[in-house]
Amino acid sequence: MAAFRDMEEVSQGLLSLLGANRAEAQQRRLLGRHEQVVERLLETQDNAEQGLREILAMEEEVAQSLLDAKERAHQGGVELQQLQEELQKAGEEDARVKASLDRELEELKEIEAGLERQEREVDEDTTVTIPSAVYVAQLYRRVSKIEWDYESEAGMVKGIHHGPSVAQPLHLDSTQLSKKFISDYLWSLVDTDW
């Protein structure tokens, strides 16, 4: 603004010189001043252009930053959507697994209830039969005086007969001996003297 005022001043000064027909010295002085004003104007114009270039460069950087930020935001939105879809699938799978586990738990509860019912029935049945079986086994042991080895391999009859004078081991192979022979042999060990 100051440069344009200076130019206006110079122009008015030139007009007054021409109109008044003054001396050449004043004209040179005004022309020198005019030249200074033009130089300042050109310098101001160069500075303004430089400032404009810097502003444009900054605007370009800001615009590029904004585009980069938008791209990152878009990419983040895509990733968020993918994560939401994966989360939804995981939730559905979790619901399926939970439903399956609930069904299996229900089946296990039914099986457990059935086993408890069977156990009660067995307990009721064995309550009657076990004492008599225990009694028979104890009676048989007292009469026969045989202590059985229940851990012997299959097909083997093992134990210890506690006879009237000496205890003797029993070792009979039922695969080579008949059942009648084994039975007769065991009954022969029973003491007939009461």
Image (spheres, rainbow, N blue to C red):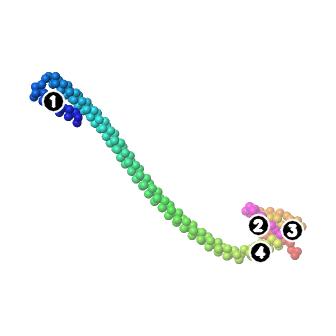
Q: Which residue is mark 2?
A: 178
N-terminal-most mark, 4 or 3:
4
N-terminal-most mark, 2 or 1:
1
Q: Which residue is mark 1?
A: 13
Residues at discs 2 and 4 in contact (Cβ within 8 Å) = no
Q: Quadrant of residue 67?
A: top left
Q: Say whether residue 7 is left or right of residue 176.
A: left
Q: Amino acid at mark 1?
A: Gly
Foreground tag (2 vs 4): 4
Q: Say whether residue 50 is left or right of residue 81.
A: left
N-terminal-most mark, 3 or 2:
3
Q: Which residue is mark 3?
A: 163
Where does the N terminus fall, quadrant-wise? top left
Q: Amino acid at mark 4?
A: Tyr
Q: Amino acid at mark 3?
A: Gly
- Tell me: residue 157, above or below residue 37: below
Instruction: Give SS at disc 3.
Output: loop
User: Does 161 lie within the magenta span?
Assistant: no
Neighbours of disc 3 within 10 Å: few (<14), some (14-19), many (20+):
some
The part of the chain drawn in magenta is 145-157
Q: Which residue is mark 4?
A: 135
Instruction: Give SS at disc 1.
Output: helix
